[in-house]
Image (cartoon, helix red, strand yellow):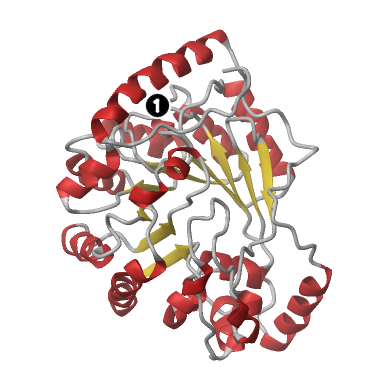
Amino acid sequence: MANIGYLQVVRHCNHLCGFCSNPTTPYEHDFESMKVLVDDFVARDYFGIILTGGEPTLHADLPRIAEYARGRGLHVRMITNGSRLADPKFARSMADAGLQLVHISVYSVRPEIEAELRGTPDTLPKAFAAADAANDAGIEVNINCVINAMNADHLDEGVRHWMRHHPYIRHFVWNNLDPSMGRAEVNQDKFTPKLADFEVSLHRALRLLHKSGRTFRVEKVPLCFMTDFAWASTETRKIIKGEERIVFFLDQKQAVRQTDWEHVYAEGCAVCSLRTICGGLFDRGNGYDPAELEPVFVDRDQIARTVIEDPSDPSYGLRDLHAWRADFEKRIARAQKTRSLPVLPDAPQVGKRTERAERRFEAKRASESRKAVSQGIEMEKVDDPKV
């Protein structure tokens, strides 16, 4: 399976997104503590690693850990806001270190909306420059976008901009907002969309990309809101192929392994033809309304066939639909249904708390709290008893 692990390199950032689900914590990494986690992914026979944060480019050892992960045979990716990657020298250093693919997060190509979502002015020019710098350095560039209440009506505008001004970008990812952690949890009223708010603009965006021959994925969106492109659902693809995900959180959660991609369903979902391959409604945080869900009646196996026969995705070994169906039914039968995030008992320690990390956390939280007041957003809850 093409299992790809997430390694949070830092948990601080130079932006202040009001819906951040992974804000600053009093934990930090050095090269050695990250190296152990890379080795763990290798031992689990993972295909690749995603270096994330916080803003991972703020860690001085980022090129070094990218080089180490690439040397261990992992496909190396990174999620960034682009603020440092806009520097061509830094982009080149990351390419030389082994970074193969970068996800640049941009939420809206309307400058005023992006600035409000970022809590920081003038971020768009740097994101655009980061895409160009990474592409010039030979790094594949994808665009990530968190769907939220402020961009829900114009997701396709971003696609049109990137296609027109940065035509080398061939892949896009939309993540519907996770309302369950960090600042996102306490600012749900401002940022959490209704599913109906983005259904039309998301469909326009996906239709544009599909027509252009580009690829895309969508996360945390039930299939009844993207039926025409159900094969592009990240959860659906993982369910069909039986993939898992491990995230090394630089906080109290530490190591989390997710194999269950199901959330909540409405009563009518029981008769939906896609029920067994749909991740349902993302339920953690209680930010969404199951009443928005409704059953659809389309060919489930045709969607499965599109996924398992995808020539650009060789990660699943069974290319025959009958073989897939037998394998899938076995997996469904033995699957343990769980709604919790299972902690990995055999995983290494993720980062550490040091005096320096504690001081950074206290200073960062104080400065962010002042900024949050001016932006009209609430600061995340601190559940750590040591803080």
Residue at x 56% of width, y 22% of height: 27
Look at the numbered disc 1 and give the secondary structure of its residue: helix
In the image, taking residue 206 as reference, residue 179 lies left or right, namely right
Query: Can residue 315 be seen by looking at this rendering?
Result: no
In the image, taking residue 281 as reference, residue 258 lies left or right, namely right
Q: Splitting the image into 4 quarters, where does residue 160 fall? A: bottom left
Q: Nearer the viewer, residue 117 or 1?
A: 117
Quarter of the figure with the N terminus = bottom right
Is residue 125 shown above or below 293? above
Quarter of the figure with the C terminus = top right
Q: Which residue is mark 1?
A: 58
Percent of width and height locating residue 95: 39, 39
Q: Splitting the image into 4 quarters, where does residue 63 fall? A: top left
The amino acid beneath tag 1 is Leu
Percent of width and height locating residue 315: 62, 66
Is residue 293 shown above or below 387? below
Query: Can residue 241 be seen by looking at this rendering?
Result: yes
